[in-house]
Amino acid sequence: MTNPARQPPRWIDFHCHLDLYKDHASLIDECDRERVATLAVTTTPKAWRRNRELAERSTHVRVALGLHPQLVAEREAELSLLEQLLSEARYVGEIGLDAGPRFYRSFDAQERVFERILRACAEQGGKVLSVHSVRAVGKVLRHLERALPPDRAQVVLHWFTGTAAEARRAIGRGYYFSINSEMLRSPKHRQLVAGLPSERLLTETDGPFIEANGRPVRPRDVAATVGELADLRQEDPDVLSATLLANLRALLAS
Ligand code: MN
């Protein structure tokens, strides 16, 4: 019998906080069993080593080195740790900017941190980024454009809520979009997602911050999101699934 965990992925969860679930280790096994290619984003660089240890033997889970913009107010000092660890990391996230009312006060610090991370990624090259941009899409794009030449990193915009013009700007730079179930609840965002080019789409859960049926979503729940996305875009779900997996391969091949 072949081991299902060794087979290619069926689904993609390109942004999930595995370390914020009580059953972190068994969730990694679940991703392998269900063949969900999962990017385990982290919120502080201090979480990196433990996440890496736990995912060491996983086929389908990769760990990203992050410093969440919502934590920059208290954690800016950990930027140097992130810079030290960066050479070990292929994936970087969660990083970005958040201009929501609770975090706006740290916005200057967030911009400093984001800029430094982007410059370091540009210098090292070959990174894949998962980027947060709540109420700050224009500024996030400006930082990316200024600090990160397109051939130095791949950018995935997580939970993108910008305008159609901002989406076009991101598409022009070669960025990808990871789509979650919550984005498909909002009529405005549905319309935006419906118009994105298929070859730039990925899926994500942003679990455990999103709930489904009264419990935090798990990576395997992206299957439902693919169904809804196919419906919205009037595509065949199997065709869309194959497209998403091809997109992941293209993203990682470059
Ligand atoms: Mn997140």
Image: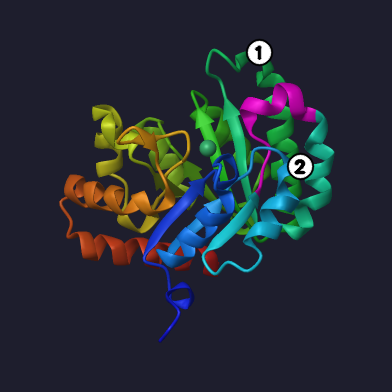
Q: Earlier in the sequence, mark 2 or mark 1?
A: 2
Amino acid type at mark 1: Arg
Q: Residue at x 50, y 47 (%)?
A: 15
Q: Residue at x 46, y 68 (%)?
A: 249
Image coordinates for residue 161, horizontal then vertical, percent: 40, 31
Main SS, magenta residues? helix
Q: Mark 2 and mark 1: span between their CA atoms?
A: 23 Å
Residue 105's disc is 1
Name the residue carrying label 2: 46
Residue 36's disc is none
Image coordinates for residue 248, horizontal then vertical, percent: 45, 63
Q: Give the farthest residue toward the bottom.
A: 1
Amino acid type at mark 2: Lys
Image coordinates for residue 17, horizontal then vertical, percent: 55, 43
For the N terminus, the image quarter is bottom left
Secondary structure of residue under mark 1:
helix
Residue 90 visible here: no
> In the rendered view, how is the structure colored?
rainbow
| Label 2 Cα crowd, 10 Å radius (few <14 / some 14-19 / many 20+) | some
Residue 193, by quadrant, is top left
**In the displayed structure image, the side of residue 147 where residue 150 appears, left or right:** left
